[in-house]
Image (cartoon, rainbow, N blue to C red):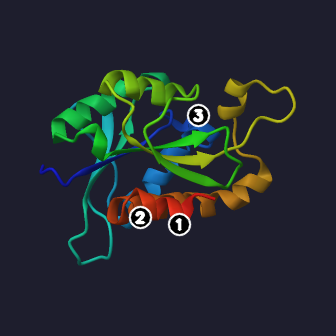
Amino acid sequence: MTADVWLVVGLGNPGPTYAGHRHNIGYLVTDELADRMASKFRAHKTGRAEVVEGRLGVPGEAGPRVVLVRPRSYMNETGGPVSAVAKFYDVPASRIIAVHDELDIPFGALRLKLGGGDNGHNGLRSMRASLGTGDFYRVRAGIGRPPGRQDVADFVLSNYNTVERKELPFQIIEAADAVECLITSGLEKAQQKFNR
């Protein structure tokens, strides 16, 4: 593929056991983007990820070329599959967007940024190690902090509560919109529109 390709990585854990967990918001957002591209995920040649190749934007118009990626590994081993797919499509870190859950942002809110630390997020840590840099974009979907003294690991690996499940579809759509805006309009405009 050419240099105009974007890699959008949905962070999560594979399999039905994890499907509804807070840690899997990245998978849910890439599912929404795949629907917009009228495509389904399929196994990639590397064998360690599922991908969708296509264009985002108005149907019938030649929008940006995008590869959606869902690693088939667990969160803490995300980096290897992401790095392999990035090498396959010759996409630099500067054209990679990681969509992930963020504890330090209230549920329902989004933040977009370029680079930064991993803030204890194992998927980001793994990507950073495998790519050799943290200079990729992040669409951070807020899940809030665990209530009371609940362990963070237990919280991120638990299902959304009843109230959150009603709001979740709106957060997924907004995060997918944020990915599209970041790709088509740049980080500054996307931050102005979605960081709140």
In the rendering, which numbered label is found on residue 17?
Answer: 3
Residue 5: image x %, image y %?
Answer: 21, 52
Depth check, front residue: 89 or 136: 136
Residue 43 is situated, as x and y percent measured from the top left of the image, at 28, 39
Task: Answer with left or right where residue 23 lies relative to residue 33.
Answer: right
Which of discs 1 and 3 lies nearer the camera? The answer is: 1
Which numbered disc flags the more N-terminal residue, 1 or 3? 3
**Residue type at numbered disc 2:** Cys
- CB under 8 Å between callouts 1 and 2? yes
Residue identifier under label 1: 193
Is label 3 in a helix, a strand or a loop? Answer: helix
The answer to which of marks 2 and 3 sits earlier in the sequence is 3
Which residue does the image show at 39% across and 62% down from the upper left?
Answer: 180
Q: Is residue 180 above or below residue 164?
A: below
Whether residue 125 is visible here, answered yes or no, is yes
Residue depicted at 71% across the width and 54% down the height: 165
The amino acid on which the numbered mark 1 sits, given as a three-letter code, is Lys
**What secondary structure is marked by label 1?**
helix
**Residue at x 29% of width, y 38% of height:** 93
Give the mark nearer the N terminus: 1 vs 2: 2
Residue 154 rendering spot, x and y as whole percentages = 71, 26
Query: Where does label 2 land, which residue?
Result: 181
